[in-house]
Amino acid sequence: MPPRAGSAAPASLTKLAPASTAEQFPEDASEDAGAGVDSPAEVRTGTVSTAQHGERLDKVLVALAPEFSRSHLQHLLELGHVQVDAAAGGAASRRMRAGQAVQIELVPTDESRAYRPQALPLVVLYEDDDLLVIDKPAGLVVHPAPGNWSGTLLNGLLARHPGAAALPRAGIVHRLDKDTSGVMMVGKTLPAVTALVRDIAARHVHRSYLALAHGLPTAEAFTVEAPIGRDPSVRVRMAVVGGGKPARTDVAVLANGEGVCALRCTLHTGRTHQIRVHLAHRGHPLVADALYGGKPALGMARQALHATHLELAHPVSRAPLAFDCPPPADFAQAWQRVCG
């Protein structure tokens, strides 16, 4: 979390200088991804008290900046943002002596940096005062997470309209995986977000996907109805597991060719990685989906999944809406090779 302005030093530490706190997220911080706009970080200083003599440096830092986690303060120490007696702080386990001067530059956490506006080139399929529908490109992360703290759809939404900052997740009501392309909806007002979330939960929103998967299914259509939860052996994956959340995917086989099948998948639920998990569970992992056993093929270097169709009632007017989104070039070329 960002430092709290004006927070007082703990009683066990003598504060030498007042904090110099600046706004970390100015209102006009709408910049292109990668262009840093950080305001100067707060620099906090203090001296090691008699009671702290012999304590580890990281423990002294926690006393000086208790609003930050110890792990974040250790990270700042490793990056050179801590000084002891005007020299590099050294190791977190360093034992301190009474009277030593400690200085730390309270650089914001990666997570706190994430929720800032960044102008992104979004392909808009529909927009009004309540609803935004976009064509998400493969490679765009929807929501900030470790390893992707900037350049996400959320950052782009914060830059696109001021009201996004007051909405949960900037209005994002469902997600597409980073390497999945296609149609995606976003609420622009709180009533719209609330209505969309309710409609998704009630299964009134209909979504279908195009997929290229390995193998040749024996049936022209099949349904996978199997619970999905965290893979107990590989935590970054999901899996079909007992006790998981109910999940159903309807699959239509459209064509076969070059050892790959072209599929249309319709979601009845919206579990994390649902189509990827269900198809892999049936022995048909997506082309180029390395996480679930897929191999590159047909020129595809990312998972071969595209959100192609979306139907919903407008969250405010309740007028029926439908959107079809053609796949991008890499997917379209691979699809053509299978379907002819």
Image (cartoon, rainbow, N blue to C red):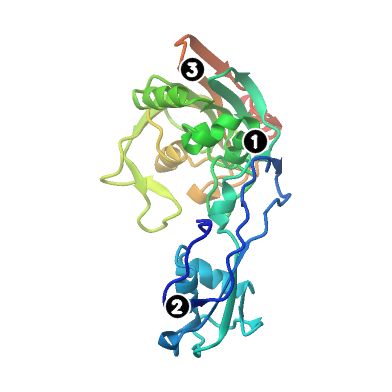
Q: Which amino acid does label 1 sit on?
A: Ala
- Could you say which disc has been placed on residue 311 in the image? 3
Give the mark count: 3
Q: Which of marks 3 and 1 is nearer the N terminus?
A: 1
Instruction: Please tell me whether residue 283 is drawn above or below residue 122 in the rendered image.
Output: below
Q: Is mark 1 on a helix, strand or loop?
A: helix
* Res. 340 in view: no
- The local crowd at label 1, few if under 14, some if 14 to 19, many if 20 or more residues have their Cα within 10 Å, is many
Disc 3 vs disc 1: which is toward the camera? 1
What residue sits 34% from the left and 34% below the top? 247
Q: Which secondary structure lies at badge 2?
A: helix
Secondary structure beneath label 3: strand
Answer with mark 2 or mark 1, whichever residue precedes in sequence: 2
Q: Residue 166 placed where, x, y %?
A: 50, 34
Tell me the kind of residue under disc 3: Glu
* Circle 3 residues within 10 Å: few <14, some 14–19, many ≥20: some
Quarter-of-image position of residue 135: top right
Q: Distance between the residues labelled 3 and 1?
A: 27 Å
The residue that mark 1 highlights is 159
Q: What residue type is labelled 2?
A: Lys
Look at discs 2 and 1 and give the one toward the viewer: 2
Q: Residue at x 69, y 40 (%)?
A: 30
The residue pinned by badge 2 equals 59
Tags 2 and 1 touching, CB below 8 Å:
no
